[in-house]
Image: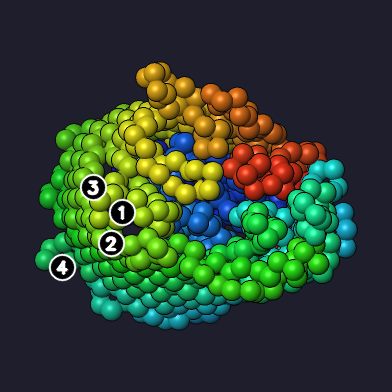
Amino acid sequence: MVVVGSRTPRAISEIPGAVWVIDREQLDTQLHTGADLKTALGQLVPGMDLAPQGRTNYGQNMRGRTAQVLIDGVSMNGSRSLSRQFDSIDPFNIERIEVLSGATSLYGGGATGGLINIITRKGEGAGRHFSTEAGVTTGFNNSNDAQYRLAQSVSGGSERVNGRLAVAYQDNGRFYDGSGDEIFPDIAQTDLQDNRSIDIMGNLNVQLAEDQTLTLGAQLYRSGYEGDRDVYFPNLDAPVPDLNDADIRDGYSSDREPQTDRRMVNVQYHHADLLGQNFYLQGYYREEESSFHAFPYSTPDGIEFRTSKQNTDMGGLKALFEADFNNTVTLNYGLDWDRESFDADQMYFDIPTSNASGGLVQENSRVEPRYPSYQVDTYAAFAQSEWKITDGLTLTGGLRQQHMDVEVEDFKTVPGGENDYDATLANLGALYDWGNGNQNWLQFSQGFELPDPAKYYGKSPDVSVDENPLDAIKTNQVELGWRFNNADWMTQAALYYAWSDKAMENAEDLSVSVVDEKKRDYGLEAAVTRYFDNGIEVGGTLHLVRSEQEDDDGDWVKRDARYASLSSATAFVGWNDYDAGRSARLQASHAHNIEDNEDRQVDGYTTFDLAMSQDIEVGTLSLGIGNLLDEQYSTVWGQRAAMFYSPYYGPEYLYDYQGRGRTYTLSWSMDF
């Protein structure tokens, strides 16, 4: 399997690190149980936390830290992280997903825990090809408990020019928990109830010459709330208003509703013999708008609802040369540049109207800036080498030097300013191939993240931009790994230890500070699959992680439960009858409990899923059952949100987002 998430195409067997490739078949199996993209990844990628289920992927870490998500090499992350990287593409348009575990600087900042590169589906060569999918998911709890999917693509062309155009549409109803109760909306980060999404994606591949190709890609994506049902607060007009005793009712309308809008273009050029080297050039631009649910704030005039809209524009260029010296030494070197611009406003809703409707009717009263606007220009140079010393032993090493200019606008009474900073990141690795299917590696790597400028600045005139430059929060990691593959087994495992000496910290008002705090994460991630001759396969994944921070006495203690990852495990048994075109898979997922040094606890849970498929005369029919045993549980995000927002912003029950109960998914697909 060739992996391009490593900047240039590499076989997994050539990479000294844990690499996981989720192909189309694996992804489809998860989707047939009703899972969304981030849920599927949590089931399939060891080291990645199980999904939080709402719109947000906040806290879905890799190896206890943040992951960078890309689509065809274009980062979905930003300096102001909104944790919506997976609310960005419909799975119908995904060919495979490449995951590099652990800290890396291959694509810049944000990948302190790993890198996830989503590779989109392309045209299939000469002639016309069509692909169709349709499906429905329901828990049979109510007439509004259903979601519908429909997707269609067409591809084709000639040997020199081919392309693909696809449209994927999904319309969700309401969600119900394991007790059959309607799930409260996620008013903090928004969820996907009554959500409608459409993903329009096209690409064109042109063979300019025998050794030159040009690929053009474009996407329009919208995912937003389209319902009229929301939280009703009965005590907003009481003498002492509060947020207790709320329920869910019809009649909701708002002048700003939760949604994600994204537009993206991506151009890639490859010359296989430019100055005797491979040359890759990529240019891209993406812009997105993210709106949130109306959120309650206590004021002297009563409870006021507000919601923000946050806009990010990002464009850049990436240039890379790959030189091969006698098939012994390979050198990759190049330059990256990008510009990110951010602005945000906050809509305030009329208090008397909100009070009279119990918060169901939200009318705009005014709009003000929400965070300081900023621009970040990034310049980076890098070099990565690979030296094949013997048939078995390969050494790798690389260096990335990154410079970032940050320009922050004035915000209300707080002056803006400019500053810059540099980050130097290195990696070293050794890979040994024993020649019998076994490989071992040892690797040291570094990654970094930038504190959120929007939340770091603008809090107070005391936090001057010029006098308080942002620092790159660098993560160091050591990894020892092993993999073994043959006709009967597919295995991979890695022990890792990651550490850093700075951290981002959220205050009660959710502003961000950078503190001198040592953090470390260490653990084991592993996956094994055993294939049998009769089409049966069994396997599972395991992630054991311990997240710690140093206290004021210099002792290592358990990290804050709002941020620490949960250990997890999955297990499955599957069966494939390729001659008859049928398959079945039963899988279990378990998240462990965690408790921090302040006795805050996140409770784990166990769920089971079943997926079955059968080829029919026209296409393939699939049936899936999600949460087979109808487990009642609170999602990890729901428990963390209660810690973040309660009691400061209201009672705990408002934020404790529940897991979805048993659902049935019937889907049909056909390629022709």
542 over 385 or under it: above or below: above
The residue that mark 3 highlights is: 423
**Residue type, label 3:** Ala
Q: Are marks 4 and 1 in contact (CB under 8 Å)?
A: no
**Residue type, label 1:** Ser
Report the mark closest to the observer, 3 or 1: 1
Q: CA distance from mark 2 to mark 1?
A: 8 Å
Q: Position of residue 252 (x, y in %)?
A: 77, 68
The residue that mark 4 highlights is: 274
Q: Residues within 10 Å of mark 3 (few under 14, many from 20)?
A: some
Q: Quadrant of the C terminus?
A: bottom right
Q: CA distance from mark 4 to mark 1?
A: 48 Å
Q: Identify which residue is drawn at 42% across, 65% down.
A: 412
Report the mark closest to the observer, 4 or 3: 3
**Residue type, label 4:** Leu
The residue that mark 2 highlights is: 417
The residue that mark 1 highlights is: 464
In terms of sequence position, does the residue under pointer 4 or pointer 2 come before the other? 4
